[in-house]
Amino acid sequence: MAALEAELCRGVRGDVGFDVTSRALVTMDASNYRRVPLGVVAPRDADDVAAVLEVCRERRVPVVARGGGTSIAGQATGTGVVLDFTRHMNRLVSLDPESRTAVVQPGLVLDRLQDAAAPHGLRFGPDPSTHSRCTLGGMIGNNACGSHSVAWGTTADSVRELDVVTARGERLRLGRDWAGAPDGLRALLEGEPALLRTGFPDLPRRISGYALDALLPERGADVARSFCGSEGTLGVLTEAVVHLVEAPRARALAVLGYADESAAAEAAAGLLPFRPLTVEGMAADLVPSPEALPRGGAWLFVETGGESAGEARARAEAVVRAADVVDALVVTDPAGQSALWRIREDASGTATRMPDGTEAWPGWEDCAVPPARLGAYLRDFRALMAEHGLRGTPYGHFGDGCIHVRIDFDLLTQPGIARFRSFSEELAELVVAHGGSLSGEHGDGQARAELLPKMYGSEMVGLFERVKEVWDPDDLLNPGMLVRPAPLDSGLRFSVLPREPVDVAFGYPADGGDFPAAVRRCVGVAKCRTASVSGSGVMCPSFRATGEEEHSTRGRARLLHEMLAGEVVTDGWRSEEVRDALDLCLSCKGCRSDCPVGVDMATYKAEFLHHHYAGRRRPAAHHTMGRLPVWLRAVARTRTAWLVNAFARVRPLARAAKRLGGIAPEREIPRLASRTFSRWWEQRRGSAQGDLVVLWPDTFTEHLSPAVGQAAVRVLEAAGLRVALPPTVHLAKPPVGDGRTVALDPLSLLRGRGRVCCGLTYVSTGQLDRARAVMRRTLDLMEPVLETDAPVVVLEPSCAAALRTDVPELLHDDPRAARLAAKVLTFAETLERHAPGWTPPRVARPVAGQTHCHQHAVLGDAADRRLREAARLTGELSGGCCGLAGNFGFEKGHYEVSAACAEEQLLPSVRDAPDGAVVLADGFSCRTQLQQLAGVRGRHLAEVLAEALDENPGRDGT
């Protein structure tokens, strides 16, 4: 490996990575398979590709081309050198609107091409559900399709010319009339005309095998088209000329409800004469919340186009009239259509879990049959699953007869793997019996190539092998795929994971307490690798800031997988590679909601840090910011906030303090409140009427922004609620404390006073033993509250999220934790549920700012939206993460990434805000980031409403 690495470094201008991290990141794609490479090269141009091939050919080292790594059949992994085209060879070289063509490099993400083509009224036809991260090179390698293939075909239909480097270094430009064909290919295939004309099934989604029939003279002898779908086994693509289609000026979406998937499948083919853009199908099992859909147990998504919105709608309504449906919905609003399409696109991740939480896996992800036979095929398919005791929920491109399904294979035990093989063999025969293709979109890879003789017969498979030998006589390119394949049940990625339980701190309730099962959640669909987020989305801000795979949710999950495997990452919880990858995780929790399979990297990071630093010296920031509640309470007890603030203004002292505390030198130390929220509470006279609500005095409200707490009390009391604070002593029974509670007996005095705390800062720095102790003390204090019907109102979203999720998951053995979590409400939720008759004051101003990432991921913001609307606060808040994220943005070495995250959505939304806009930021971190980076004061919604109450005092209690 060292000699190979050195030789590649001498001959390649791009990046050469033979380190642990580089290798661990590409051991898997989105399939069931795992192959450990020797190293990774990110070439800068075709010369680099040729240099890599020359070195590897001399050393007989296999080469695998990789794009977005979302392949589902295993073809984007390899044991030799992996070529990563996403880092450098990712440009749109040119776009010609007149000829409707574009020249692209293989690492270009599809959405970037679509963005460039859209201003010209054009688009690339195929659009897989992974369009925001899949690459054109990967699409060409797999002959990808997507939901619009009924209108615009497969990738092969959109390819005009391809620049390819062969394994022996020959540079070819592939096109029609045998252009670019390697020596010997034409002579070989012209000798097999009958086999080429009769050996391929005629159906729209035949992706399996080599597309040799494209080389027939009546089909233009198109070498570029025949290269599509070859999965990197014939040559390495370096550039492509692709055709663009005219995008409809307007679209409408008809969602058709059917009783079940069989009814939907039977109906799909009958809708094709209406020339729809899409005919997609899915069943209720894949829809977590079907409220937005019409009645039914399965749905067809039928998209129509037109020159105007009226024409598109008329076509959609014609489809509805012709369809025999239970219910239907026609949507012309682009935002509404996007929301519905997200349900369909997320199915590829949702399908990885059965409704009861059982894992489900690819393997038979995309077989296709003639559309007219889809209903019959699905019935036979379900019967075969039942015969093998398996479950899965089909969905996909019903108009093309292409079905996606993940099945609850047991790929962890030998009997389960044996069933996987026998089922695969029988299903292949079933697909062929219905005139279908083993692959209808994602290629054969390792998952199905072994079964190609069942579809094509031995003579055709033998021809595939001879074609491979013409292109790649040394079998250098992606060996084990398509021809002479590896067994479909070998190299499974689960086989390397530990069989015994891993001792962990969190409970992982959704994964049965099994940490490897939690890590297995990441199946590689890579939604975290999108370059931008839409709406209120968050995941994954560190990837968008750095563009590096290791700083994506998927990349971190891969490193954790390899840590558990112990082959590439060999030092377990002590791994510096895993630590470094997790270092730029903001713990924003965006993946918890935005990842279609619910990966929760914030929890995994806390777990890892807990083990990594066990018995070892921690970074200074873990002490300064992880124990922030301790230091702030000490300042409050000694009443020295004024002194700390004065020192912070003396630059030499501030620099020294930040250097000792591991704080980024670019950061200002936030100013402490001269009077804490609790002290203000003790000195006021409150309302004693109305339903009781318990206001949580979180660390940030208590010591850094007590004005938020004061405003919340003002609004809650104006809404007719009676506000109390949690007890500060341990009480054997109610009454609930109100912040002034004194000890009722000597035992209470002995136990001492305390303050509730969610433990957030300890969790985020991985100090989980300390976090548990703090949480248990909090539960002791909160016991009287748990005996009441009073909700617990939490103003800081990150603390509310910690109480809802971290506390019950870390104290999974304490039933009080779940009871407390169930009581936690946000400020807006409290007003909506406990003061439903109250009307907020009319603010009537536009808003700008950002929904807190923890609120988006854990709490939801529906109640906040309704409260803003009732107060006549207009406009939408942006998504993403502010980048400060608690301790993250304050830690040394994180400032640039922190600022980049803020610059993605938060700061532009504030800069572009209309005059007089209210900048809303419910989180202390968000407000601090706004102040320090933009000089803008953000406010909590409670502050805005309280100010409006002061301007309209007659609103109190109405």
Image: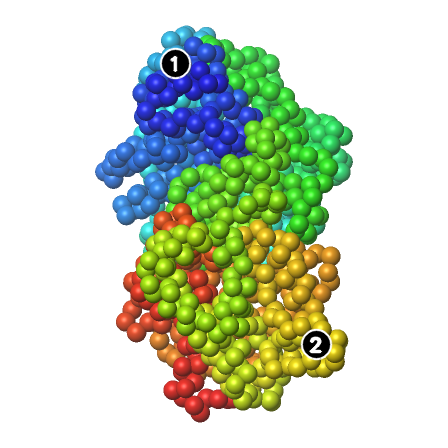
Q: For the point 62% across and 71% down, which residue is it? A: 754
Tell me the amino acid under the disc marked 1. Glu
State the image coordinates of residue 525 (x, y, percent, origin top left). 52, 40
- Circle 2 SS class: helix
Viewer-nearest residue: 786 or 74: 786
- Residue extending farthest to the left is 98
Viewer-nearest residue: 748 or 807: 748
- Circle 1 SS class: helix
Residue pointed to by mark 2:
749
The answer to the question of whether label 2 and label 1 lie on touching residues, with beta carbons closer than 8 A, is no
Between discs 2 and 1, the one toward the N terminus: 1
Viewer-nearest residue: 647 or 596: 647
> What separation in Å lies between label 2 and label 1 (alpha carbons)?
79 Å
Q: Residues within 10 Å of mark 2 (few under 14, many from 20)?
A: few
Q: For the point 35% across and 42% down, which residue is it? A: 112
Q: For the point 52% across and 55% down, which residue is it? A: 623
Closer mark to the observer between disc 2 and disc 1: 2
* Quarter assignment of residue 837: bottom right
Q: For the point 34% across and 65% down, which residue is it? A: 649
Residue 400 visible in the shown view: no
Residue 878 visible in the shown view: yes
Q: How is the image coloured?
A: rainbow
Tell me the amino acid under the disc marked 2. Leu
Question: Relative to 630, is 465 above or below?
Answer: above
**Does 808 sit left or right of 92 as displayed?**
right
Q: Residues within 10 Å of mark 1 (few under 14, many from 20)?
A: some
Kindly identify which numbered label has been placed on residue 747: none
State the image coordinates of residue 890 (x, y, percent, origin top left). 42, 55
Question: Relative to 610, is 80 above or below?
Answer: above
State the image coordinates of residue 931 (x, y, percent, origin top left). 35, 64
Kindly identify which numbered label has been placed on residue 54: 1
